[in-house]
Image (tube, grey):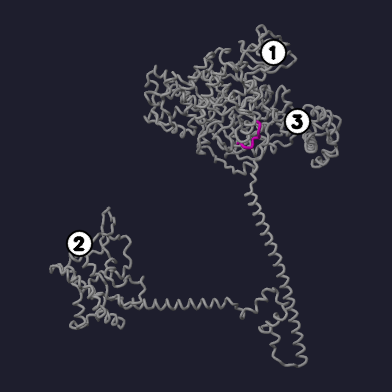
Amino acid sequence: MATRKVRYKKLGVKTPLPILREDQVDPTEYESLTTESQIATGVESVEEKEYHLQEVLQGAGVAVDKEIPVPPPEESTLNYDELYSQRPSEPRTYIRFSQTVEECIGCMYDMTEEDEVFLKAYNQKLAPPATLSEDDFEKIMEVFEDTAYIKTPFASVDQTIVPYDEMLQGLHQLDRSKVMPHAKDIYEHWKERRQAMGNMPLHPTLKFEMHQEKDDMDPYVCFRRREVRQTRKTRARDVQSADKLKRLRKELEEGRQIVLLAHGRELMKLEMLKADQAIFEQRAQLKEHKIRLGIKTDDEDLINVKQPQKRKVPDSSSVQRPPPPLAMRLPVRADGRPSDADLVRLEDRLAEKANELRADIEKKVQNHHEWNRNHVDLTQGPLPPVHGLHGPQPAPSFRPAKTQYLMTPPASASSASLEEPTPMDLDKPQNPRPVFKFRGVSPDEKAMDNPPAYRRRVGRLNRLWIDRRGLASPPREVSAEYSDRWKYDQSSDDEEDTPMYDVDPFDTLALKFRASVPLPPWMTRATGGRQPAQGVLPPNMARPQPALTRPVSQGQPVP
Amino acid sequence: MSPNGTNGEASVGSDGPRLKGKATPETITVGCIAMVVKDGKPRRAEILSIRDTKSGKQFYCNFDNFNKRLDEWVPVARIDFESEVEWPNPDKDKQKDGKAKKTTTVSKKSQPSKKAQKKVAKREQSVASEGQTPHPWTEFVDSQNLKTAKTEDLDDKANASLEIGGTPGVGPDEMELDEDEIPANVAKKERAPSFSREEEIEKLRTSGSMTQNPAEISRIRNISKVEFGRYVLFPWYFSPYPEAFGQEDCIFICEFCLSYFGSLTSFKRHRQKCTLLHPPGNEIYRDEYVSFFEIDGRRQRTWCRNLCLLSKMFLDHKTLYYDVDPFLFYVMTSRDAHGYHLIGYFSKEKESTDGYNVACILTLPQYQRKGYGRLLIQFSYELSKIEGKLGSPEKPLSDLGLLSYRQYWSENIIDLLFGYSEREEKCTIEGIAQALAMTTQDVEHTLQAMKMQVYHKGEHKIVLPEKLIQQREKSRAKQKRLIDAHRIQWKPPVFTASNRTWGW
């Protein structure tokens, strides 16, 4: 039977197991499958073999009538209701309770049979009002026991019995009038009983450890303390705690210093006030003398405001100015505002200059804006420059299409060159770059500025939109209308543009310029593509541009 | 194992030959093994103590293969002096000890299999050397601290013989086979090394509440009778109540504060003063039937000590060596007009290094066999569920503990499996463990013990045995009480390191 088991696959805890009912398995097979059984029960191995346990286990978990026999409990013969007479009030909520047993018991001493006999005999000797109640008896006994426990912890070994005098202290805490008449007699009884018990506590107590060798094997010694885990002493820890102590010491020292200094300061203030008062009185006297003697001067020497005079006083006799270090530093500084005031002024000046510079630049930028506000470059398709002005950065959602243009050079080259807003460039030589995106004049760089780009959007109903930008194709398709639509658009928008049209069409400058303007792509295509001409054009463009733009830019600010 | 009491692996004086001879009541001594009448039948019994009473000599007998709770004082009349008794050899005293030590081979957590192989090899040696050293345990006792190869051999032998489960006379070869070829058994057989006293104490210091060392256990019951509430209890085991109580015929324990008294007058006086009506802690569960209280061993030291003393009378392996501070006690009570009566409890380490969710668990004898144990166990697992942990009771289990746990485990696993089988789903051991907050080992052990886990056609499968199906129907008809998890008002208590170390 054993050999088969070697071939078992290991059963992992995550293996999915099919569940069958017993009737789904061949009974004989099942029998043989389940015969192996030695399962760790977790029971002590000696006890595992015990007869009654084995007998139950043989049933293999099937409810058997067999049980492990135990000594049966019995009903108590004591009167339960009398013993447990209290009735609890049933709380609605869950009970929360933290009192300890000691707090719930009251007096820890409970009378024994001997005590009962003694107390009865004792009380018989007394008149009824003077008798000692059981409760008081127990209280007295408790004091004796407690005192004995504290004062003679090894009473059972050295047989010392606490004398009555030492008990008094504890007894005084009780209700004296009730207790004191009886205490001495009870003490004798207590002593007698203690001696009879070998000076052990009258209530049997548990054996706790006494730190003796024999404790360890004594089965009665229980509830030992667990040794407290000591924190390991290492050099690092030593250093750490030394540092901590040092820091603590330093902080305390500083606190002390502050208190001392504050105290000193207050003393000095007091002194100063006294001095002020003295001065005032002196002046009053002086005034009186003056009046009496009829000396007429201005009363300036009576007023405290005089700075230079005041200054002299502390300088000559440093007694009056309370903190000496301050007095030392004062002369060095120029008139209240110390040296760092100069520094501040320098910084201010620098800042001022920088601000001026900035303001200047900003003003110029503003001016430039003003000039160009409604300017439309008529010389080329209006859209690209406008675009470049108002949308300084390409929208981030557009991504440049990085197509390689090698295969289709003509169309792209021409469209790129068309978009150049070159006339404007020369207008603003000191233009800060962030305001206008134009850089340099190099056509190549310009071409890169606005490469074709695409944006993908998902619209309502999940419609997909592809936005294109930087492509020349759209105007191509609507070429006919588009060619003159801009006129109407622009003219209707702004009247300020009109001066531009006043230029004499036959002016040589204008003619020259127009001649330099490359033909729009649709025109070039329509005419069969003038590629060679385009290649030549860009360099030409650079020259006429200033000619055109200058009148425009000059003219605009005027109205 | 045959039900014949005298057969099987004898637990009493089974090691080697002993001197035999006739004895008289006068000459018989402690350590002798005699035939003693128990339940009308003669049974081998070791005499552990002798005392004189007014009615004559009495002998404290531990019966062969009977649990210690059935030990008793017997009068001369019940001992068979006609047949021979076995005398203790001078070195047999030690042997007794040694046997106890030797058997401290708890099948605990499996260790790496490397050790298993090593052990198998070692064991082969030992079988060979068996002839030369017939009783290695006598030496073992003397040198128990040095863990020699011999001690290991010894352990192996103990286990091997255990394995066979009371079929004496099996040759060593067959043992060999058994062990080599059942991987599961090999794994199971790895065990913690036998506990030396120092290790034992260290273990107790850091965790746990169960002694692994049977030598720890006092063998003679000290208290014969206890008045507790409405009941008179007859203790099963030794409990370290004050030594003076050993002389009392009966001791009295207050049902609520669990204080103990040797004198009835004292007890009555105490009852007049005691105001406690329920365990001194917070109620964390209540239904129509029972309430649970949570009690911190550190805050309620006296009460918890009292509880431990009380429960020690019914738990053999519980140890009271160290104090109750590191434990929480979950106390189950029943309510009536008089108050909240203690039914049972389980203790739980505030922080268990071994992942135990129960340290000790006890239903008081007067409430046993009424389904309370199941409630206690269920509650312990409900707490584990709230903690989000898998739990297992601390080992060793007692015989009754094993039965209770097996019943709880098998019932719950079968319930779960029924659900799976009705949905025609497969299940994993881990899935079961998670659903029931049980450890996977416990799940596996239960499946094996219930003979539900089979290896069939190259595949592990679970079979629901017909008997268990019927039993389930039966118990469903009975409508057992259950813990209603929604009524638990409990958060896992948190203890910081300083909390545990210093009590802050």
Chain of the residue on which disc 2 is drawn: A
Q: Residue furthest left?
A: A527
What whole-number distance in Å separates the C-alpha atoms at marks 3 and 1?
A: 32 Å
Would you say the magenta stretch is mainly helix, strand or loop?
loop
Tell me if B25 is positioned left or right of A117 in this view: left
Q: Quadrant of the N terminus of chain A?
A: top left
Q: Quadrant of residue A324?
A: bottom right
Disc marking residue B75: 1
Label 1 packing within 10 angstroms: few (<14), some (14-19), many (20+)? some
Q: Quadrant of residue A35?
A: top left
Give the residue number, with chain letter if any, for mark 3. A203
Q: Looking at the picture, tell me which residue is in the foreground, B302 or A153.
A: A153
Tell me if A31 is positioned left or right of B68 in this view: left
> In this rendering, is residue B368 above or below A237?
above
Residue A300's spot in the image, x, y percent? Answer: 69, 87
Label 2 packing within 10 angstroms: few (<14), some (14-19), many (20+)? few
Query: What residue range appears in magenta?
Result: B320-327
Residues tagged 1 and 2 counted as in contact (Cβ below 8 A):
no
Q: Looking at the picture, tell me which residue is in the foreground, B115 or A127.
A: B115
Give the residue number, with chain letter if any, for mark 2. A408
Q: Looking at the picture, tell me which residue is in the foreground, B9 or B111.
A: B111
Q: Which mark is nearer the camera, 3 or 1?
A: 1
Query: Are labels 3 and 1 on one chain?
Result: no
Three-letter code, disc 1 = Pro
Chain of the residue on which disc 3 is drawn: A
Three-letter code, disc 2 = Thr
Tell me if A71 is positioned left or right of A265 in this view: left
Residue B174's spot in the image, x, y percent? Answer: 49, 17
What whole-number distance in Å separates the C-alpha atoms at marks 1 and 2?
A: 121 Å
Q: Secondary structure at mark 2?
A: loop
